[in-house]
Image (cartoon, rainbow, N blue to C red):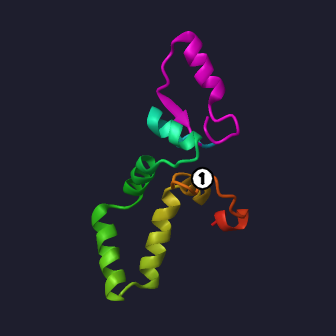
Amino acid sequence: KMDGTAKGGGALIACSITGAKVVFIGVGEKVNEFEKFKPKNFVGRMLGMGDIEALLEKVQGAISEKDAQDLGKKFLKGEFSLLDLYEQMTAMRKMGPLSKIVEMIPGFGQLQLPKEMLNV
């Protein structure tokens, strides 16, 4: 489990002693908050360096590439509407809590942002 203060330390020690392999890690409290274990990404998160790969996976799961391009074109043309904003916010909500998203951005994991900013 990666969302606590231990950051999976106990599990890593147990795996080291028993020779077991880590396949998945829990990154939150809910059943759908499991990710495939990738050592490079794991270490990056532990060190507060973010995890761009996992962030991109979340974005791809929340909005299709075509929809993202269409929204970008509308925005650049000045045709971005409140409905478009709503659709974008809905897609962001599919990605999970903002606090988890911010942790994946390099340099932001160590920032202490006010909870009011993260509870969107």
Q: What stretch is highlighted in magenta?
A: 1-27
Q: Is mark 1 on a helix, strand or loop?
A: loop
Is residue 11 in sight in this rendering?
Answer: yes
Between 19 and 96, the one nearer to me in the picture: 19
- The residue drawn where x is 47% and y is 40% is 41
Q: Position of residue 119 (x, y in %)?
A: 66, 63
Q: Name the residue under label 1.
A: 109
Q: Does the magenta stretch include residue 16?
A: yes
- The residue drawn where x is 56% and y is 57% is 102
Query: Is the residue 37 above or below the residue 69 in the image?
Result: above
Task: Indicate the quadrant containing the C terminus: top left, top right, bottom left or bottom right.
Answer: bottom right
How packed mark 1 is, by other alpha carbons closer than 10 Å (few <14, some 14-19, many 20 or more), is many
Q: Is residue 59 magenta?
A: no
Q: How many labels does the image show?
A: 1
Residue type at mark 1: give it.
Answer: Gly
Query: Is the residue 83 above or below the residue 16 in the image?
Result: below
Task: Indicate the quadrant containing the N terminus: top left, top right, bottom left or bottom right.
Answer: top right
Q: Where is residue 105 in the image (x, y as percent from the top left)?
A: 51, 55
Q: Which residue lies furthest to the bottom in this view?
A: 78
Q: Position of residue 34 (x, y in %)?
A: 52, 38
- The residue drawn where x is 27% and y is 66% is 66
